[in-house]
Amino acid sequence: MISMAANLTVLLTGCLCLYLVIVLMKILHKYWWTPLRIQRAMNLQGIKGPRYRFIHGNNKETSKIIKEALSKPMATLSHDILPRAHAQVYARINSYGKNYLSWGGDIAQLYITEPELVKEILKNSERIFPKRTSRERKRNQDNILVKIIGNGIIAAEGEKWAKQRKLANYVFHGESLKNMTPEMIASVETMLDRWKQFEGKEIEVFQEFKLLTSEVISRTAFGSSYLEGKKIFDMLMRLSVLANRNFFQTKIPFISKFWKTADSIESDKIVKGIHNCVMEMVEKREEKVFSGDANRFGIDFLGLLLNAFHDPDKKNRLSEQDLVDECKTFYFAGHETANSALAWTVLLLAIHPDWQEKARKEVLEVFGNQNPHSEGIGRLRIVRNLIVLLVYITQHNLVHLTLNISE
């Protein structure tokens, strides 16, 4: 019996040692051998970059560069915003050239910043930019950024993407936008009335536009009150803060699968809270239809989603999670882009008062003392050009492409 127990102990010890050796080999292959092989292959092609560091790649260095850039105020107001907005890209372009290799953990990232080369790659029709597969999304489900957008239109592909894109296109159709104009005007008037109490004082317009865009989206796309939308916006903003804080954090192999950080646990609670808030809006809209107070779900974005959610054809029907993810995408992406564009436009107009005066004169010529209307908005040539110029300036300063390189 003693001999059998000893043999069993030796066998188990041997199996455990073998398992540990295999695990160690896999770790070394993924986090050491493969990155060094990729780095050498890129170097032979003339693509240089910061040296790969075991497991964390260049994440620590990147975080340090960004932190230093954001710790200092901008010396002058300038269109040259790359050193501030993407400090790590700016620093590495100066060190390694316009195209370089960097490392996000064990993922090799090829940065291309030459506009012509970026255009050449993007117009390639052989689908070299597939979205993340369901397997990859599952593997990265603890990624806080993935939790923000879920599996909405940004992540979807194929038939699912086409169905979601069709819904989004309808929302931004000309007639749909015309119907939104009165709600937008009402929201702006509310903001301007609030500003009267600050006459002669400074106003933090970025925060004001954040309130404005959140109210507009809540009222036009979801038919909800500002307070309902604010709860979702606040939770999404908190998620984005957590995502930014953890963007360059490196997860320890295997351990991260069994142990969650405080930020990860908090993000799970926030995602659940957003899900509950969206479903509360859904249930209120459904209740009106089911009780006979309304004969349809509505023509806004939430109404279109609910029509798809209750589609009798299972192939076209949205799942509950898809519905929530689409709402999250619309809330977050629409809010951030509109808010940033408004703030940046006002900043540029403040820097160039001559164009500010031209834009004001054109608006008064078209609308006089009346509220804006869809027919007149199309005749605002100077204002339209200012917006186009804003987009061009931003793209010109930030144009770069990042390719994740697999084995």
Image (cartoon, rainbow, N blue to C red):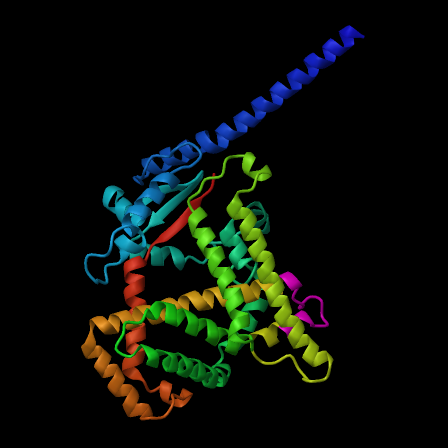
Give the side of residue 301 with respect to residue 401, left or right. Answer: right
Residue drawn where x is 54% and y is 50% of the image = 266
Image quarter for residue 346?
bottom left
> Dividing the picture into quarters, in which one does residue 322 lie?
bottom right
Q: Give the dominant element type of the magenta stretch: helix, strand or loop.
A: loop
Q: Which residues are magenta?
A: 306-321
Q: Position of residue 56 (x, y in %)?
A: 42, 37
Residue 330: tell me if it is visible: no
Is 230 left, or right, of 134 in this rendering? left
Residue in the picture at 39% in, 41% down: 59
- Please tell me in which quadrant of the rendered image residue 347 appears: bottom left
Above or below: residue 314 compared with residue 303: above
* Camera-nearest residue between 315 and 304: 304
The image quadrant where one finds the N terminus is top right
Residue 234 painted magenta: no
Q: Is residue 191 left or right of residue 382?
A: right
Residue 291 x, y percent position in the rendering: 73, 81
Depth check: give the residue in front, 152 or 87: 87
